[in-house]
Image (cartoon, coloured by chain):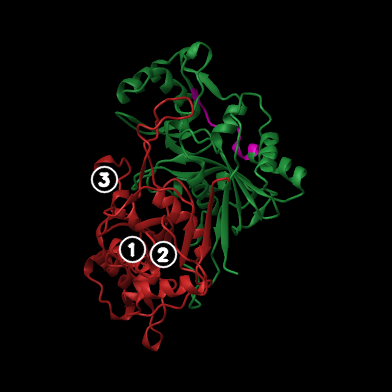
Chain colours: A green, B red
């Protein structure tokens, strides 16, 4: 029996509203998709539906830009109210130039616009433009989903919260993990032997990021609305105490900051 | 019918030797794995088996380091013969410090050690240590595999050659595409509308990299020996003239070089 990994989008998945019980919606969608999670399965959840359930939507017309935001907006050509939110969500601005702000998000992720998204945000009252911030604590969100699925199906599943980030050196964004529960995000190969008995040179694989990227293939970015993907057959190390922050390269080990 | 992506490792897969007909080995392995490729399927092939078939193995004891290699070896604490090969394979050294060399490979990839690998290289005559260089032209290798599979099965498949790269900002390596045939490596979302009718902000998804990362989940890094993964159900844009070099961020668009 060849090794196989199967990814299935949970369809249909409802439009998520602020205050919704997202773990409950996921349990219902699993049942409606005729998927019975088993031990060792993974659920990958697009962060946007978590942010929406948490009400992490901000109307741009309710934001007053600071002088610093006005300055950075002028430098980058971006909306000062949007830049104000980027600054509030960030520890530091890593790079800025016309059209682009790379920030270190308060959770440690280094990405464009502190991961604030202007797409897939429903309009506010009166059609005001809204943006979506990252969830408060994506690891905690992942744990809550893991517990709800465990309680409903009696299965020990891992949960990944993913986002889509651009990268240095390579064009195009890819899915990455920003929250995990129940799995070690990194797979340590040190001490393992290769085909010819040598100790491995590459020390760690970012398994949670590879799963996040794989799920992104099905999540779509447009009107398809499949934010949750079930994965069966992937190998990973279970870890009930893991955090996605283990994926953040410490600044002193990063030659590109 | 929910959207589904299925990845299957081709097992068994033989140990590849210099001079082997790799496209032929893949066709045989598909038959032995009882997989009949269909239009729109993807095959992801670990670059190491291509390099081995091409004889891209170098005995370290046959390499004479240049003065520049000796200097960089002293700076980084690496074997001067290994560093000599890194320099020969590179356009430029991007960063160097003890234990680490980040180079721009002659094909444009920015990665550790110009993608030269000391693991999974069979020992040379007399047990001499060998290393593996990247294939000469991973796009051409992908095209040859695509053509062989098309001829054997009458199916229009896409082929990705992947490697495992580390990244700025994030720990752990992930699978990435370094060769493609039959597919656009980037999916352009510009002009597509999101759930609420806004034009998308994220412009491009690196679909070939997401597929390369997904396949990496099954390829393993150690003695498992499953270098080729078949993928069914992924959406991508077909393109007979594409090259993986479309994934390289031009230096003028890269804030981190």
Q: Is residue B53 left or right of residue A111?
A: left
* Label 1 vs 2, first from the N-terminus: 2
Closer-to-camera residue (B74/B171): B171
A159 vs A216, nearest the viewer: A216
Give the labeled residue for mark 2: B45
User: In this picture, which residue range is highlighted in magenta?
Assistant: A131-141
Q: Chain of mark 2?
A: B
Could you tell me residue B117's position as x and y percent? 39, 68
Secondary structure at numbered mark 1? helix
Query: Mark 2 against mark 3, which lies toward the viewer?
Result: 2
Q: Earlier in the sequence, mark 3 or mark 1?
A: 1
Label of residue B51 in the image? none
Q: Quadrant of residue A148?
A: top right
Q: Residue at x 41, y 85 (%)?
A: B127
Left or right for B56, reference A218: left
Residue under circle 3? B250
């Amino acid at each position: 029996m060849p090794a196989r990994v199967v990814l299935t989008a949970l369809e249909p998945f409802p439009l998520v509203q602020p205050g919704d019980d997202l773990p409950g919606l996921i349990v219902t969608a699993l049942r409606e998709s005729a998927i019975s999670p088993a031990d060792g399965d993974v659920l990958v959840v697009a962060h946007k539906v978590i942010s929406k359930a948490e009400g992490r939507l901000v109307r741009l017309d309710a934001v007053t830009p600071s002088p610093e935001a006005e300055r950075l907006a002028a430098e980058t050509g971006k909306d000062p109210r949007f830049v104000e939110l980027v600054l509030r969500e960030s520890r530091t601005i890593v790079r800025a130039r016309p059209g682009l702000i790379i920030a270190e998000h308060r959770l440690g992720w280094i990405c464009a616009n502190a991961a604030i998204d202007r797409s897939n945000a429903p309009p506010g009252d009166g059609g005001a433009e809204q943006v979506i911030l990252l969830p408060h604590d994506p690891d905690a969100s992942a744990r809550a989903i893991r517990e709800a699925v465990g309680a409903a199906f009696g299965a020990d599943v891992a949960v990944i919260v993913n986002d889509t980030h651009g990268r240095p050196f390579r064009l195009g964004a890819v899915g990455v993990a920003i929250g995990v529960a129940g799995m070690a995000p990194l797979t340590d190969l040190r001490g393992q032997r290769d085909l010819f008995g040598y100790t491995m040179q590459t020390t760690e694989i970012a398994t949670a990021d590879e799963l996040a990227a794989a799920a992104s293939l099905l999540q779509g970015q447009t009107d398809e609305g499949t934010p949750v993907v079930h994965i069966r057959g992937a190998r990973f190390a279970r870890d009930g105490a893991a955090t996605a922050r283990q994926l953040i390269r410490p600044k002193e080990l990063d030659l590109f900051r």
